[in-house]
Image (spheres, rainbow, N blue to C red):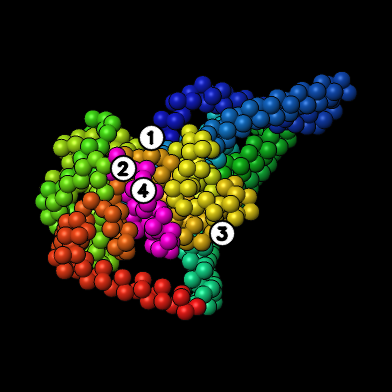
Amino acid sequence: MIQALWQYVKKKKLSYIIMLVTIFIEYFIVLVPTNITQHLIDKMTNNVLTSQELLIQLIILFSATIIAYISFYIWAKILFGNQIEFQANLRQRMFGKLLSMRAQFYEKFRSGDMLTRFTNDTEAFSEFMGYGMMSVLYSLAVFLFIVPAMSLISWEIMLVSATPFVFLGAILIWFQKKQEVAVEKSREAVSNLSDEVLEVVEGIRVARAYGKKELGTKRFRQKTSQLKQKANGIMRYQAMYGRLGMIFVSLSTMIVVGMGALYMKDGRLTLGQVVALQLYALYFMDPIWMLTDFIFIYQSGKVSFAKLMELLNSSDDLQEDGTTELDMIHSISFNQYSFKYMSAQEESLKNITVTLHKGQTLGVVGKTGSGKTTFVRQLLLQYPIGTGKFSINEEPVTQFVRKSIERQIGYVPQEHVLFSKSVKENILVGNPNADILDIATAIETAAFTEDAERMSDGIDTLVGEKGVSISGGQKQRISIARAFIKQPELLILDDSLSAVDAKTERKIIEHIQAIRQDKTNIIVSHRLSSVMHADWIIVLDNGVISEEGTPQTLLEQKGWYYEQYQRQQLEVEEDEDSHSID
């Protein structure tokens, strides 16, 4: 942790040098009021203080106060300004890390825990750069200026009065290890509370539908109570530090007063010098208070630094990025390809062999859990490449730069992800440079024109967080329009038509056939009507291709595809009959 902070200090070397100089100027100036007080008291004791000398001393005192204030302003602005900049840079670095990581990385961290690392942990770590560094520099200034000033008056009193602080330091070191455990527990409680809040926000509709608001309230109350208990544990240690500090400062004061009185009796010190010693001793209070805070800041920063480094140093375990730019997709092929998730015991895909050429449409069907989504995830390169051969343009996929592959793909996932912006802004995520005509074409292709016109502000209507203010079918079609506007070489629809009716589905499929004749498409669906136009269809069953062929060939084989087709046709006929009766 110290090394990471030191690297930042070296980058901002000039500003920290200025800060150090101004802190030392401030503490040097602090000596002036005490010296003036000592001088005036001695003068008054001897009845030799004149009005002119008093005026001069007051002018010097006022000037010293102004200089001390300016010095304080300069070093505080530099120190805490650098802290804020350090914190911002750290968060940007972490966010850049998140953007560059694939799906497997996100399986290592809970959402609430990751949020805690972005908020509490970055603040705790950067706090060490600000207030923590100030505590160290203040203590150093006391040692460099106050201790010598006391020694010039009486080094014996200085040494004896400093003895209580040696014992205080030993006690604080003993408490340090106990507080480290308390800080770690408190930080984990914050992470758990963040997880609970995110779950409640994301699942509020389900909770209300099932009347589980009381259960959510009870769980939140438990998490809050746990956090309160852990935080109170830390506060107990800090309270003990503060009281101990006051006790030992009081002991030091008693020593100064007692020895000062004896030395005055022997004529070795004047009243002004004893008062000066007492005032100097009081300057130890700030470092003592700061030391109690510093121990907490150091422990919190140490724990947070470990959490931040864990996130920054974790990888998604993907292979090294390739070096060849992919400009066009001519073919995609899997040959005896198998894949297993990191946390799974069995392979999710087994010996997959299929080839897709430019301009073709591949349909992927199968029962729930058969491996359809896992199959399309291989094309998105979200997980490490499995065993067997996975090629693009007859070259290993690992040879290509991953970002260049992403640029060729338009993807509509099962879980439609919308941002809390307008319909237009959500669509433009696919192509920020698109014009209004491109947007209109994409909306028309996704069969969303009528819905957009009925919205209060048209395509400028806000959809709410995760599209909360619109229907499931509308979410899907906005996601489809976002993929269409990109005009990708490869379009992947992962069960993306499940929330639209048969008529709308038919429109979208017709548009795909019309405008993407020379481009490649992969359609994953439970509805066979979505893939009836496909050039080739594979049926997945437990990660294995159990059937494959053209739609007509699969019907002739009278296997799972045929049975599913007959069942869905019967459901369509029954639905049409019910509508005609209505």
Is 266 in front, or is 348?
A: 348
Q: Is residue 497 above or below residue 65?
A: below
Is 473 in front, or is 529?
A: 529
SS of the residue under disc 4: helix
SS of the residue under disc 2: loop
> Residue at label 2?
517
SS of the residue under disc 1: helix
525 sits to left or right of 158? left
Is 563 in front, or is 91?
A: 563
Q: CA distance from mark 2 to mark 1?
A: 58 Å
Of the residues tagged 1 and 4, which is closer to the observer?
Answer: 4
Q: Which amino acid type is shown beneath numbered disc 1?
A: Gln
> Residue at label 1?
3
* Residue 179: assigned label: none
Label 3 packing within 10 angstroms: few (<14), some (14-19), many (20+): some
SS of the residue under disc 3: loop
Q: CA distance from mark 1 to mark 4?
A: 56 Å
- Stretch of the chain drawn in magenta: 492-520
> Residue at label 3?
469
Label whose residue precedes the other's in the sequence (2 or 3): 3
* Residue 512: assigned label: 4
